[in-house]
Image (cartoon, coloured by chain):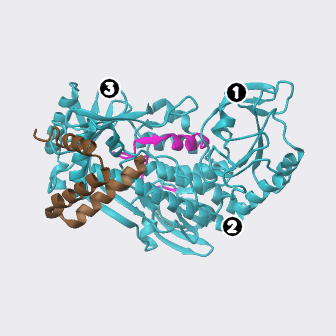
Chain colours: A brown, B cyan
Amino acid sequence: MTDSDLDIVYTRLCKTMTQLGEPNASFFLARFAMLAIDAIDDPAVALNLIDDASEGMSE
Amino acid sequence: MEFKTYPFTAQKYTAKIPMLDNGIELERHAVTIVGGGPVGLAVALGLANHGVPSVLIEADDSVCYGSRAICISRRSLEIIERLGAVAGFLKTGLPWTGGRSFYRDTEVLHFKMPQDENQKLPPMVNLAQYHIEQFLLDAAEKKADLIDIRWQTRVTAIDSHTKGATLTLATSEGDYSLNTDWVVACDGGRSTIREALGLQLKGTSYEGRYVIVDIELESDRPTERLAYFDPPSNPGSTVLVHKQPDNVWRIDYQLRDGEDPEQAVKPENVTPRVQNLLDMMGERAAWAPIWITIYKANALTLESYRHGRVLFGGDAAHLVPIFGVRGANSGIDDADNLAWKLAFVLQGLASEGLLDSYSAERVFAAHENLSYGTKSTEFMAPPSFAFELMRKAVLSLAIRHERVRSLINPRQTSAITYTASPLNAAETTPGAFTAGPAPGAVLSECPLTTVEGGNAREAHLTDLVRPRFTALYFSENGSVPAEFFALEETLQGEKLPFKLIPVSARLHPETYSDHHWDHTGRLFVMYGAKPGSVYLVRPDGHVLGRWHAAVAADIAAAIHHALHT
C-alpha cells in the first residue's frame, strides 16, 4: 500500500463514518475491526494489533 | 499590548492619467492586466520576456501590506529566475527543507521536502508577500518600456466583446476608460472582473477557522514548518509556526468549535494564546503582534479560465486552502503558463486555441492542487467528528507506528504534470523511455557544464529554459545532425523562438561549438537518454515531447501541433 493508497482509504473511512453519524461510529468501527481481523487471518498479528491499539489509551 | 509595524517601508506611487480623447485613452493596448499582486506582476514580466508590452492596473498605491503568502516553492523560484527577479528572493528569503509535527508533547513526524545534490534552488523559501511583490516590481520597473503600471487605479466596469474589452477606470485624479485586445484578471479572491462577468467559483468552503497572527520576535530557531496538534499550551487546538525574515513569525491556530471569530481576533484574546505557545516552545524574548486576521479554508475554482478575451489567473481563478502553500505558488504557475501563450497568439505565431490550453492545463492543475489541499485541510481543520476522531487515532499511533505518519505530512506544493494536455506530443513508442519527465511534466534539475565560445562554466539544466522552445539533443560528443540546424534556421525564419541545445556525454574540448556536458553522468541516466534522444521543452519548462533516434520533422510537427491545436 502506497502513501497515496493509505490516504484514499483513510478519507473513505472518515467520509463513510461521517455519513453514518456519530451515534453509529463505534458500531461501524467495531464491524470494520471484525472484518479486518478476518482479512488479517493471523491470530498472532491480530492479537498484537489489539494490544497496540489499546496502548496508552487509558491516560 | 502595542502593535508593531512590519519592518518594511513601501514606496508610495500616485495615480497618473494617460493621454485621453473624450475620456478614453488614446492608445489601444494589446494586454491589460488587472491586479498588481505577485500573479499580475509575473504575467507582465513573462510577456515582457517575449517583448510584449502590457498595462498593469493596481488599485493600491504600493505593494501590499499585511499577512499573506509567505512560502515560495522551488518551482516558483525557477519561474521567478526566468522573470529576472530571483536574486532578491534568495538573498532575503529564508530557505528551508522540512518540518516537524508534534502531538501533545511528542514529535510524531519529521518530514523532508525533495532535496539532493542535483538541485540549484532550495525546495522552499519564506519571505513576506511585500518582499515577493517588491522584488517582482523592481524587475518590472527595469522594463518600464514594456510594463506600464497604473497605480491607484480601480476597475469599475468591464465591457468585453469578441475583439477585446473596454475597462472603465477610477482614480484619485479622475476617471477614464481604455480599450484593450486582451484582459488578464489577476485581481484576487474578490475579483472585480469575475464579479462583473457574473462568474462564480465552485467547490467547497470549510467551516473550521484559523486565526493568523504575524508577530515580531527575535529568535535563532531554524527555519522549518512546525505543527502542534493538541499542544499542552493550547489544548484541543492545532497550531502552525513559520519563520519569516527580519524577526517576523507567522502563527496560525485553529479556533475552538463554536468560538466567535470576531471575538477571537481581538488582541486580548490572541495575546494569551500566543504567549502560551511561545512559553511552551521555550521562546523567552519579548514579542509584539503585527497583524491579526481570520482565515477559513476554501477549495474553489472557476470552471474555465478563458472567457473570450478575458483570462483569469491566481486567486481570481481559484482559491486553494493555505495548508500545503499552493495559493501564490499556483498563481505564479498560472502566470508562467499564460504569458508565453498569450505572447505567441499576439505575435501571430499561434492560433487562439493555444489560450484554451491555458485554461485546460491550469484548471486541471487547480483540481490537483485542490485535491491535495483538501486532504491537508481535512487533517488540519477536520470537517466532521469522524475526521476528528480518525486524526486523533493517527496522531496517537504515530508516536510508535511509523507507517501512519504519512497521513500527517502537509503534502507541500509541487509542480503539476499536465498528463492529459492537448499540447503534449504523443509518445510514439510507449515505454521507450524508462526514466525522465514525460510530456506535460517539468524538467527535473541536474547540474551540467556549459561550454560556450570555448569557455566552460558550471550551470544547471533549468538554466536552459528561456522564452522559446528548447530542444535538448543528447549525443556522445555534442555533435548534432545537420537537419536539426536546418530546422532551427527554418523556425527562426518564421520568427518562432526556438533553440537547439546539444547535450553531450563527454567534454568536447577540440570544438568551439557550444554544448552542455553532463559532467556528473547523472543527466543521461535521469532522463533515460541515449545518443540521438531529444527532449523538446516549452517556454514554461514543461516537456512537450521526447524521442529516441529523433528526426527534425518530429520536432517541427510537435511545435506546430502545440501552436495550432
Mark 2 crowdedness (10 Å alpha carbons): few <14, some 14-19, many ≥20? some
Mark 1 crowdedness (10 Å alpha carbons): few <14, some 14-19, many ≥20? some
Q: Nearer the viewer, residue B243 or B357?
A: B357
* Mark 3, secondary structure of its residue: loop
Whether B103 is drawn above or below B164: the answer is: above
Asked whether the residues under marks 3 and 2 belong to the same chain, the reply is: yes
Q: Is residue B74 magenta?
A: yes
Asked whether the residues under marks 2 and 1 belong to the same chain, the reply is: yes
- What is the chain identity of the residue bearing mark 2? B
**Magenta span of residues:** B57-84
Q: Nearer the viewer, mark 3 or mark 2?
A: 2
* Mark 1, secondary structure of its residue: loop
Q: Nearer the viewer, mark 2 or mark 1?
A: 1
Q: Which mark is residue B221?
A: 3
Q: Nearer the viewer, residue B353 or B263?
A: B353
Tell me the quarter of the image containing the C terminus of chain B: bottom right
Q: Is residue B515 magenta?
A: no
* Mark 2, secondary structure of its residue: loop
Q: Is residue B225 left or right of residue B28?
A: left
Q: Residue at x 35, y 50 (%)?
A: B376
Whether B389 is drawn above or below B361: the answer is: above
Q: Which mark is residue B519?
A: 1
Q: Is residue A38 left or right of residue B269?
A: right
Q: How many marks?
A: 3
Q: Position of residue B438 (x, y in %)?
A: 63, 50
Q: Position of residue B287 (x, y in %)?
A: 23, 31
What's the residue type where badge 2 is placed? Thr
Q: Nearer the viewer, residue B95 or B385?
A: B385
Q: Which residue is mark 2?
A: B565
N-term mark: 3 or 2:
3
